[in-house]
Image (tube, rainbow, N blue to C red):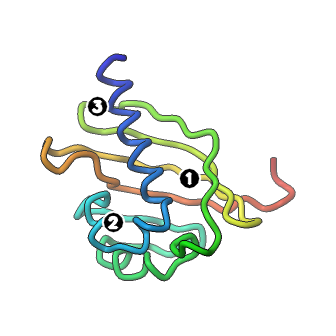
Amino acid sequence: MDDAEDDVNQAIAGELQLMDPRVRASQELATQLLDPEFVEVGGSGRRWTYKDMLAELPHLLGSSADGLRYEPSEISGVLLAPGLVHLTFETLLGERRTRHSSIWRKRDHAAGWRMYYHQATRVPPEVD
């Protein structure tokens, strides 16, 4: 495995961790995976900051151990530059299908890979 592939795999691992209800319910764990400059444009069009996301994540769908869980598919990534990975994938959360794009960055080895940007777009049922 080359370095680029390893970097992409590490970003994918972080993405999957952020879908885990235990991580979503824990600000401490989520802090380790979100970049301090994190921004998201959610499926609803809402803009989320790092502070907003950490406050709300435990209360969002997919954050309860006994609730709906994210089912990811077609996850792939590309190394854009050293320390910068772009991922794309789809999820199902109950009946809600969403397409995602995220950028992960690694500023130093101690902090590891963290999500810098995330975009989610809901997919209407009639769209392939």
In the image, taking residue 86 as reference, residue 68 lies left or right, namely right
Give the camera-side residue of 64 and 74: 64
Q: Is residue 92 above or below residue 76?
A: below
- Residue type beneath disc 1: His
Q: Residue furthest front?
A: 66
Q: Which residue is mark 1?
A: 100
- The numbered mark, 3 or 2, whose residue comes first in the sequence reads 2
Residue 128 position in % (x across, y down): 81, 47
Residue at screen point 72% across, 65% down: 96
Instruction: Find the distance from the CA under tag 3 to the CA under tag 2.
Output: 24 Å
Q: Label 1 crowding class (10 Å Cα cut-off): few <14, some 14-19, many 20+? A: some
Residue at screen point 43% across, 31% down: 78
Q: Which is closer to the viewer, label 3 or label 2? A: 2
- Residue type beneath disc 2: Ala
Residue 11 position in % (x across, y down): 38, 42
Instruction: Find the distance from the CA under tag 3 to the CA under tag 1.
Output: 20 Å
Residue at screen point 50% across, 58% down: 119
Q: Which residue is mark 3?
A: 81
Label 3's element?
strand
Q: Is residue 68 above or below residue 84?
A: below
Label 2's element?
helix
Label pair 3/1, CB-CB below 8 angstroms? no
- The numbered mark, 3 or 1, whose residue comes first in the sequence reads 3
Give the camera-side residue of 24 and 99: 24
Residue at screen point 39% across, 33% down: 8
The quarter of the displayed image where residue 108 is located: top left
Residue 95 position in % (x across, y down): 77, 65
How many callouts does the rendering have? 3
Q: Which residue is mark 2?
A: 30
Residue 81 position in % (x across, y down): 29, 31
Q: Label 3 crowding class (10 Å Cα cut-off): few <14, some 14-19, many 20+? A: few
